[in-house]
Image (cartoon, helix red, strand yellow):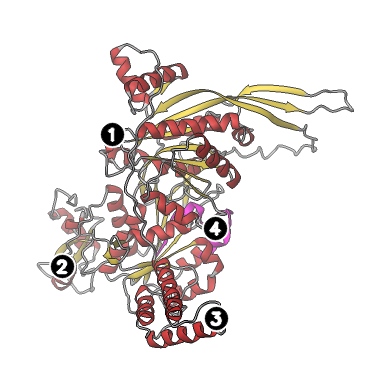
Amino acid sequence: MVERDSHRFFSKDQRSILYDRAEGRCQGCSTALTNGWHADHKIPWAAGGPTTLENGQALCDACNAKKATQMHYSDEFDPRPFQREVLFRVIERIREGQQHTVVLAAPGSGKTLTYQALATNLIREGLIDYVAVFVPRTALAEQCETGWMVVDANKNVHGLCKLFDATKRLGRVRHRVNETPLTYPSENGSGFVSTYSALVTNEDMFVRWAQRHQGRFLLVADEAQFCGAAGDREDGGTKAGALIERLNEFARHTLLLTGTPYRADNQPLILADYEPDPSHPKKMSLVCHAEARYSDGVAEGYLRTFELHRTDARVSKRTLGDPDSGKGDTLLEYNLSDDGDDLAPVLRDEKVWKPLVDRVVMKVRDKQKFNKDYRGLISCMQQNDAKKVQKYLQQQYPDLRVGIAVSADTDAPQALADFKVKPMDILVTVRMAFIGYDCPQITVVGVLTHYRDGGHLMQLVGRGLRTWSDMPPRNQSCVIVAPNDPKMEGFLALLREEEEQGLKLIDEREPADPGEEPSDPVQQELAFVESATATTTMASSNEVDVDADELLLIEGYKVMADSGEDASKIKKILEMAGVLVQQAPPVPAQRAEAPLTETPKTERKQVADINAQVAATIRAHLYRHGVKPDSAGYQEAVTRVTAKVNESAGYNASQANTVDKANRRLRSALALK
């Protein structure tokens, strides 16, 4: 049930203020208000709208009756407080004539469903006809389309999201790259989703659509911290930010959804405003209109608590001498926990990354004692690093079910989609799964990257923070396996403290002293990491620290008891009992196989599959009539029969860009005599 304000009706004082604010005129049609005028909720009370002046308006009897007939929807959507706040703020800002709303939300807060619910509300209010969504990754675009579908076991679409009354709601949201039309004129209330990269590549197509539908669409910039940053090719770079600003000029309203208060390159977000931070005079704080922090998610049960395992390393760094000066080579040995400047080469030493990978496997097997479908994610710096990790896992743990998704693989988006539904243990990836990837079975995250800004790490760790409906929230936690460098220590503090301003970038640097004179260039000594070896590991949760010696003893106790509990939880129990036990040989965890399932497909993929069936049906038809691939004139025969199918269906393969059109071609092919 939707949580409602305990006060249903506006007080006498509130009614008086609403009347004066409206200057005695209906805020729907501007007619003079008479006795019996209505103090109305902008967002209906039944939908969770508060009985406050901000959510109130003065309406005449006719406008109130008209609105009432439009608002009787049997929705099952029960918005979280954060989602309810977004719905309220956007409606409020639209009525105030504001052009955009900025929302700062931790990963796993339910941003996708938030903007889909918002679009439904705006369509019902008659404020928009379409929604245009832009995201950083193809996988996220496909997730937006398929997540709004109701798909049966045969991947047939029977309807849309069942959380909203089908009488009137957001329609199909199709993933578009360069297909036209982006939306169909006959499908008011629908939309499209695309990537920032596609926006840059097909600028004219998107701008023309925005111009044709000026003032009648909601523009959504999802994961906006990657929009405008000078990122990789798929992110779209700075041009995408400029184009979103241009589309904003045509939109009825723009919703900016971000995981961090700054862009990925530490620059201000597009369209956003900033104000001085009272606690840090040199810093500027993002002005956001709604916010969902990590601590909110933990408190409300949709995000998990964490336990961070940090492994230290002993590093040997050699600096080559200068023969001219007579200086010989020097060797510096230090702990990674004291200096993380050479983190990238340290993580590439197999004596460091292999123990980290082993610990991920150990923690995944711990979690699978609670549920066999729990799994882990390992993030690597580059594709070659990911492939080395995958090979090591396959050789060292032959019974482990390992997947890989890297940018160079054309099947990477499908690999990400399949990992959610097929029996798997660990997914190895690079940046493919950092942004918006939703797989709540992930409960262990291995950090083998050297990126250390707070926003980036929160996006990565967030893949394991979303609670899974198959298990009670209080019984779930996310184990993070990472190197013990100083900036990871800072990220631990960030997770624990949950600053009021949201996620801050750990890697921020203080500006240089304006009076400092530039110095002459100095020839740097040639130095490199000669070797690095993983040493001890400690664990930290939201509240408790477990040092290296304690962790060894506790893990031994876990093996003896065949327990999968987090070390920090066991430490609390042992402290109450006042006793620790000796270690015992580990016992391999048993795992039952889960049934094989398939992931839903986007409309584009469904159409491609059906068109492939048409081609196969045509080849089979020719074969039955004695026309084989090695026959003379085979290609001409294929062309002739394909033309016959196209004529019967009314579409060729390129024109059959919907499932219905593609199925019409298939029926025509199956009807060949």
Query: Residue 507 colored magenta?
Result: no
Q: Which residue is mark 2?
A: 68
Q: Nearer the viewer, mark 2 or mark 1?
A: 1
Which part of the image, by quadrant, shows the C terminus?
A: bottom left
Q: Nearer the viewer, mark 3 or mark 2?
A: 3
Q: Is residue 164 visible?
A: yes
Give the residue at x 53% y 60%.
Answer: 241
Image quarter for residue 426? Answer: top left
Q: Is disc 2 surrounded by few (<14), some (14 to 19) or many (20+) residues within 10 Å?
A: few
Q: Position of residue 78 (x, y in %)?
A: 22, 52
Q: CA distance from mark 1 to mark 3?
A: 65 Å
Element on which disc 1 rests: helix
Q: Which residues are magenta?
A: 218-243
Q: Which residue is mark 3?
A: 631
Q: Position of residue 470 (x, y in %)?
A: 27, 43
Residue type at mark 2: give it: Ala
Residue type at mark 1: give it: Asn
Q: Which residue is mark 1?
A: 475
Q: In terms of depth relative to the viewer, which is nearer, 554 or 330?
A: 554
Q: Nearer the viewer, mark 1 or mark 4?
A: 1
Element on which disc 2 rests: helix
Q: Which residue is mark 4?
A: 234
Q: CA distance from mark 2 to mark 1?
A: 43 Å
Q: CA distance from mark 1 to mark 4?
A: 37 Å
